[in-house]
Image: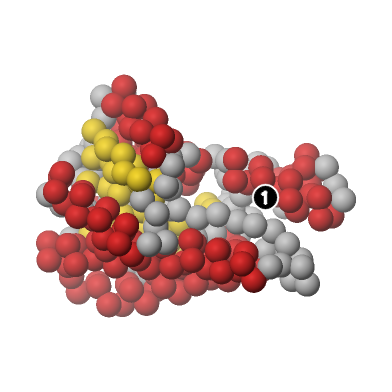
Amino acid sequence: MRHQDRVAIVTGGGNGIGQGICEYMAKLGGKIVVADIDLDAAQQVVKNIQADGGDAMALKVDVTQKAATQAMAADVLKTYGQIDILVNNAGTDKKGAITELEESTWDMLMTLNLKGVFLCTQAVMTSMIERQYGRVVNIASMAGKTGEPFTSPYCATKFGVIGFTQSVALEVGKYNVTINAVCPGPVDTELIRQSVAQSAKIKGMTPEDFLQEFFIAPTPLGRIAKPLDVARAVSFLASDEAEFITGSTLNVSGGREMH
């Protein structure tokens, strides 16, 4: 199987896109570390994987804290002896007009969405370099390629994730470590439902009308993504089939984002 005996850490693995990635990669033979600040959610995903015959462990991790990310890597190495794959998925969004956004919102999103990617990548990289093998996949966004209104902090963090991905790829390629980013469009998760509700309120629309007008109608394939769509893309980039791909972005947007 594609990920047979590969050890994969997935941050934000307790729900939404992260849960989809964990459960899909486990079906392909991966040993999955479900890392999430919500330990109960992470443990439930582990139960799902184990019920399906897979191998997984749960870790409570705050990706914004260096000590926590270093402990995460140490725990995984102690349990499995190696770290083959890191999926930096933990993140969030909060909408607001530029004239009304709080500085605390900017700081929170920068810390979670961007600093968290840096800290987790740094935590696993020494081990990957020593083993001369590693796959890092960062969850960016189509909002990291094309700006969107009322989303300036989130867009800034996701543009940053793509830049970080390209820079690190130039550093670690000689060690047989690849790092790429997946850029989803809207994905059917609780996070997107909250985001749609916030944006709809700003525009004085119902969430259903906002979703149809701004997300579904502009998408050539006529729907928003499912977590499984993203999981398949992540799985490919984390596999040996993608061994000659690094510093790249893969859109999973149904054709809405094409560059």
**Disc 1 marks which residue?**
195
The residue at the point 16 percent across, 51 percent down is: 77
The mark tally for this picture is: 1
The answer to whether any part of residue 211 appears in the image is yes
Q: Where is residue 53 in the image (x, y as percent from the top left)?
A: 26, 24
Q: Where is residue 98 in the image (x, y as percent from the top left)?
A: 74, 71
Q: Residue 68 falls in which quadrant of the image?
A: bottom left
**Quadrant holding the C terminus:** bottom right
Q: In this view, does 156 lie above or below 140?
A: below
Q: Position of residue 3 (x, y in %)?
A: 24, 43
Q: Where is residue 140 in the image (x, y as percent from the top left)?
A: 49, 60
**Quadrant holding the N terminus:** top left
The residue at the point 33 percent across, 64 percent down is: 66
Q: Name the colouring of the figure.
A: secondary structure
How busy is the neighbourhood of tag 1: few (under 14 within 10 Å), some, or many (20 plus)?
A: some
Judging depth in this view, the residue of 2 and 42 nearest the camera is 42
Q: Is residue 253 above or below residue 244?
A: above
Judging depth in this view, the residue of 215 and 92 nearest the camera is 92
Judging depth in this view, the residue of 61 and 248 nearest the camera is 61
Q: Residue furthest top?
A: 51
Identify the secondary structure beneath mark 1.
Answer: helix
Q: What residue type is labelled 1?
A: Ser
In this rendering, would 80 be left or right of 48?
left
The answer to whether any part of residue 45 appears in the image is no
